[in-house]
Image (cartoon, rainbow, N blue to C red):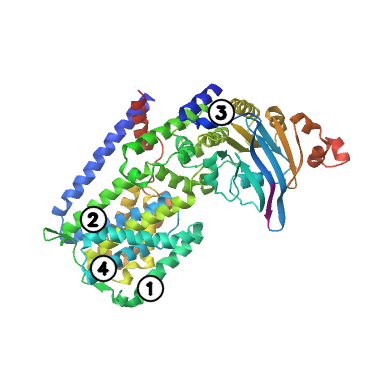
Amino acid sequence: MSENVIKIDQEIGREKGDLTTKKNGQVLLQTEQLDKKFGGLIAVNHFDLKVSRGQISSLIGPNGAGKTTVFNVVTGIYRADGGKVIFKGENLAGKKPHEIVRSGIARTFQNIRLFPNMTCLENVMAGQHCRSCEGMINSLFQTHKQHMEEVKIRKCAEDRLKQVNLWQYRDELAKNIAYGNQRMLEISRALASNPDLLILDEPSSGLNDKETEDLMKFLKGIIQDHLTILLIEHDMNVVMGISDWVSVMDEGKKIAEGLPEQIYTNPQVIEAYLGREEDEEDE
Amino acid sequence: MKLNQDSGKQKGISNRWLIWLVAIVFLILPFLINDYWVDVLFYFGNYALLGLSLNIVLGEVGLFDLGHMGFVAIGAYTTAILNTMFGIPIIILLPISALAAGAFAWLVCSPIIHLRGDYLCIVTIGMGEIIRLTLNNNPFGITGGPNGVFGIDFPSLGNLFVIDDSVKFYYYIWVIVGLTIIGLVNLQRSRIGRAWNYIREDEIAAESTGIDVRYYKLLAFILGAGLAGISGNIFASKLMIVSPESFSFMESCLLFCIVLIGGMGSIPGVIIGSAAISLFPEVFRPFAQSRMLIFGVAMIVMMVFRPGGIWPRKRGSSELQLLHMKVGKEVE
């Protein structure tokens, strides 16, 4: 699978200068003192997060901790009330979602958001939109240039769809395929924009054990190639199984971060998840 | 895969035959019917053009626009005023009306483009009504108030070629409808058409997949208004008079019905929808008073049994088949 990924990225031709500067362990995404309020509710409170290049970082925390809000601020759906989001050394605050995608962050949603009445192939082609440029006039007259770009878009979508083993469903409407496949299709659509950072919001929710296993293998596979993953996850097996780094969030604040093993035994984390005193023994 | 391509090719061929058949029927039709029916078919063509223009906004992007006749009015009055005051030929005013309506759409829609669903709907109703009432009140004495502007020329190229009778108007409108269809089909098959559909399907997902939602929504409005402006130009030169009552809210509703009856985002659907709207009342004219009742009942029945429209757009193999085949060829 990973061979496939490398091949695709070579074909697409990422910026060459970028490849040489890419060293694992470098900070790719960083939030500094991020704030987000909804009316009187402080959803994210002076939140710091670091995501290192080439790693799988996880963000965990109890329900309502503000994890998805952080994601929405990073991807530009919400505007931050304070603080910075720095991606590849550039402040993303105030940028629009489509500009952020173009700069190299792709995401998926907690409750799958596909384009239900369009085919799987068209869904994945959406990812290439920000990497193509043909405008109105060329599209109206179907010029040769426009056609070549369409072919390129379609070829890329084909590769991405084959990568998640959904090529046989290319002409099915996205709403008609199985739930597990819809999840993979969404990831495939995100990958089709050739991102540097892939943000996954609870990718394993609603999947059975086997599908979760496959997903973990898949994520480990794609990480081999200059891709960085940030995920929110509730399934501790997934978090502990594939994360290189874990940050824990509660009530809008970061309460701990570290290697998965460290987090597993951190008393603060256990408290946030399970509560204090005798509740702990029940578990 | 191979089998799939073959069946696609066959389907493509049969579709092509169908298109040629329809084109030939349209070509010889005026010789078989009287002038009255040629005129009815002209209005059918005009509704088809309007339906196609609204289809960009409502069908492709899913924006509820109930003030579309406002754009037509801008096109028609631009033509009428410039023609009667300065004597500029109608043909030259055709692109100018389109530009005027498009520019107007850009101006008016820029601040409201972020509104969703029913809110946008209400604002567009307001916009359409404001245009109509403004024209009615004769600003600067150029719109002629409720009487409108009259004495508009026929479209002509010098003295060589004048479109002055029903049959010529019939060909004129249907050539323009044909060209519009070709352009819109091309757009549907491009990244722009797909971007519009992504926005209709899920705006937030489209935004976070890298689509500039605001830009594409505005583009749809401007393009739709531009086409509406062209339709307004033809309408003005056909009737030789424009008056505010032609651009009422009811007309906008009729256009809305065309797209809904035909099938949102489906070009053949829109043509059928406009046929239903323009031909149905004529065919049932003998029933006099009760024909609108029959029309209403027919619409209700249709919406119950075919909620997706008469000819909904089919996605899937046929849509991308062409590209499949082309890709196959180039790869080999």
In the rendered image, residue B309, in percent from the top left (x then y), is placed at: 39, 50
Q: Is residue A221 left or right of residue B44?
A: right
User: Upstream in the sequence, badge 1 or badge 4?
Assistant: 4
Query: In the drawing, does residue A61 fall left or right of residue A210?
Result: right
Q: Which mark is residue B134?
A: 1
Q: Residue at x 68, y 35 (%)?
A: A58
Amino acid type, label 3: Thr
As shown in the figure, which amino acid type bears the numbered disc 2?
Ile
Badge 4 marks a residue whose secondary structure is: helix
Q: What is the chain letter for disc 3?
A: A
Separation of residues labelled 4 and 3 (CA atoms)? 62 Å
Q: Which residues are magenta?
A: A33-38
The answer as to whether the residues below labels 2 and 3 share one chain is no
Q: Are marks 4 and 3 in contact (CB under 8 Å)?
A: no
Instruction: Note whether residue A64 is visible.
Output: no
Label 1 chain ID: B
Amino acid at circle 1? Thr
Q: Quadrant of the C terminus of chain B?
A: top left
Indicate which disc residue A20 carries: 3
Letter of the chain that mark 4 sits on in the rendering: B
Mark 4 or mark 3, whichever is nearer to me? 3
> Quick one: SS at disc 3?
helix
- Location of mark 2 (residue): B173
Asked which quadrant contains residue A276, the reply is top right
How dense is the environment of label 2, judged by Cα within 10 Å: few (below 14), some, or many (20 and up)? many
Residue A259 place in picture, x, y as percent: 74, 31
Any mark on residue B82, and which?
4
